[in-house]
Image (cartoon, helix red, strand yellow):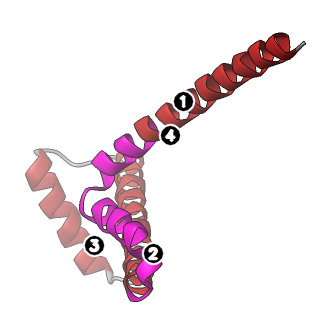
């Protein structure tokens, strides 16, 4: 914002004051500017990540064994929040399932050892 001339800055402040119904203090203005910068940074980061995922999806489409990964990446690009939740639930389910399977296999080994000896 520092590269703009003072007239444009004053006009922006006037428009903002009209929209809010009052003039903002220096601290309030700085806080709004920081919030706007944070939002812009998040949007840019998301665009950069999506661009990388699109390229990775294209590469996965070219290699037939990676088609399931391409499907997952496509779903993540289309529905990022929903797929993040589904991924979290699936990860927890795999973890619990793995622990249960390890327990069952351990019990089966103990039973087998007792049966043989």
Residue bearing mark 2: 66
Q: CA distance from mark 2 to mark 3?
A: 52 Å
- Label 2–label 4 contact, CB within 8 A: no
Report whether residue 98 is seen: yes
Give the residue drawn at x 16%, y 62%: 14
Residue 40 versus residue 81 in the image, above or below: below
Q: CA distance from mark 3 to mark 1?
A: 59 Å
Q: Quadrant of the C terminus?
A: top right
Main secondary-structure element of the magenta-colored stretch: helix
Residue bearing mark 3: 9
Mark closer to the chain start, 4 or 3: 3
* Residue 24 place in picture, x, y as percent: 27, 48
Give the residue drawn at x 23%, y 78%: 8
- Using the image as rendered, state which of residue 71 and residue 29 is in the foreground: 71
Mark closer to the chain start, 3 or 1: 3
- Using the image as rendered, state which of residue 81 and residue 88 is in the foreground: 88
Give the image quarter of residue 21.
Answer: top left
Q: Which secondary structure lies at badge 3?
A: helix
Question: In the image, which residues are magenta?
Answer: 62-88
Residue bearing mark 4: 91
Question: Disc 4 or disc 1, which is closer to the eye?
Answer: 1
Mark closer to the chain start, 1 or 2: 2
């Amino acid at each position: 914002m520092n590269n703009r001339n003072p007239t444009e800055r004053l006009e922006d402040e006037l428009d903002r004051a009209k929209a809010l119904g009052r003039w903002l203090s220096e601290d309030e203005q700085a806080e709004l500017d920081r919030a706007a910068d944070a939002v812009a940074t998040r949007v840019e980061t998301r665009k950069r990540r999506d661009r990388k995922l699109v390229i990775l999806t294209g590469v996965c489409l070219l290699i037939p064994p990676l088609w399931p990964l391409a499907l997952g990446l496509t779903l993540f690009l289309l529905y990022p929040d929903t797929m993040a939740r589904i991924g979290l639930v699936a990860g927890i389910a795999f973890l619990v399932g793995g622990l249960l399977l390890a327990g069952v296999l351990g019990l089966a080994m103990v039973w087998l050892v007792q049966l043989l000896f």
